[in-house]
């Protein structure tokens, strides 16, 4: 590849830190930045720097602007159920479904000892403390992606939660909307059969 | 979608200006930015602002750091052929093939009157001036993407170039490497047949 001017090179190097962005995509972004006006670039640069103002909620560890987030502060929300998610962004995904009306706790990742993600790095202690302080929590929903690390994390947490005398539940496995039966894997199909519902 | 803290919202809004980046991808990038250290974010922000230092070559209009780019300054390169490209980035694509050793001229886009891309916005005048001042240029290669606007631009420029008594050529149409004959469209296949070469 031809040597680009240093400023283009630098922005490409910085943009490849984004997930799923390789040199080609980064170069495409760089050229779109070059096509912008300088004040637009400055607005983007400022918004990136201003991310330092994002705080995490002291209750649930979700990203928020105050010390306690709007969900933890909401008295309308049910207190007898707690939903554990891996990352802050998972909350918005679940909220979009508009089915869950309890509170959340962000674990801060999944168990993955090889990558250094051990229970003491994650908010496991905080979960146990919260269950200890809030006997009204009867059920803990483990809303993790059903992949290898998500499954490991859910199994690990379920044991801890059951030791404290609470119910540990997980999201149903089944066919996503619009799925093709022919291409559904046998584990999903098996679980969808077991979890079948009356029509 | 749940309301995110304002700084996240702002960075998402700014990142959706990138080509092919919608709110979901922008949110993914925003969370990866939140996971970075502040000094890494500052480096990215600075590199974006520093793009104002990128100049365009006074000869070929490619992005460069000096007033004349390294290709235009290279006496080793052939002067009897000129390659016209739409954007600065196309030069690096062609250079990577390592087949062309002449000089370039960046048109600055393709003809698209509906989007306001008329000949006077593009470097058409500069091309004609260059051909007038450099009688040694015998051939002009029109290296545009073979889509509707690229084809229109090539037809428009070819007439101007031929009026000035020079050859106007275009890139060959044919099967890309690794292509599947079955899935090749009939126009490409027809042109590949016409342009067939001896083995």
Image (cartoon, coloured by chain):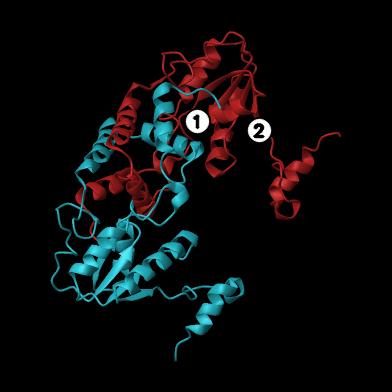
Chain colours: A red, B cyan
Which chain is indicated by disc 2?
A
Please name the residue that numbered disc 2 is placed on. Answer: A171
Q: Position of residue B25 (x, y in %)?
A: 47, 40
Q: Earlier in the sequence, mark 1 or mark 2?
A: 1
Q: Residues within 10 Å of mark 1 (few under 14, many from 20)?
A: some
Q: In the rendered image of this protein, does residue A99 appear above or below residue B75?
A: above
Can residue B90 be spotted in the picture?
A: yes
User: Which residue is rendered at x = 30% and y = 29% of the image?
Assistant: A46
Please name the residue that numbered disc 1 is placed on. Answer: A89
Can residue B199 be spotted in the picture?
A: no
Q: Secondary structure at mark 1?
A: helix
Relative to B68, B151 lies left or right: right
Work out which quarter of the rendered image holds the N terminus of chain A and state it: bottom left
Q: Quadrant of residue A150?
A: top right
Q: Quadrant of residue B42?
A: top left
Toward the right, the furthest residue is A199
Q: In the rendered image of this protein, does residue A174 appear above or below residue B138?
A: above
* Count of all numbered marks drawn on residues in the image: 2
């Amino acid at each position: 590849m031809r040597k680009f001017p240093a400023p283009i090179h630098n922005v490409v190097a910085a943009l490849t830190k984004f997930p799923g962005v390789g040199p080609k995509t980064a170069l495409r972004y760089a050229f779109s930045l070059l096509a912008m006006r300088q004040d637009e670039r400055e607005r983007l640069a400022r918004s990136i720097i201003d991310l330092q103002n994002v705080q995490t909620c002291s209750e649930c560890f979700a990203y928020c602007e105050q010390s306690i987030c709007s969900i933890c502060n909401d008295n309308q929300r049910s207190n007898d159920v707690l939903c554990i998610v891996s990352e802050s962004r998972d909350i918005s995904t679940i909220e979009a479904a508009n089915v869950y009306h309890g509170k959340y706790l962000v674990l801060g990742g999944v168990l993955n000892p090889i990558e250094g993600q051990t229970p003491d790095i994650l908010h496991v202690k905080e979960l146990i403390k919260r269950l200890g302080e809030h006997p009204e929590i009867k059920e803990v929903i483990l809303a993790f992606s059903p992949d290898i690390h998500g499954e490991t994390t859910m199994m690990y947490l379920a044991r801890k939660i059951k030791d404290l005398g609470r119910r540990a539940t997980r999201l149903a496995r089944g066919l996503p909307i619009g799925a093709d039966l022919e291409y559904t894997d046998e584990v999903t199909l098996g679980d969808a059969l077991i979890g079948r519902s009356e029509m």
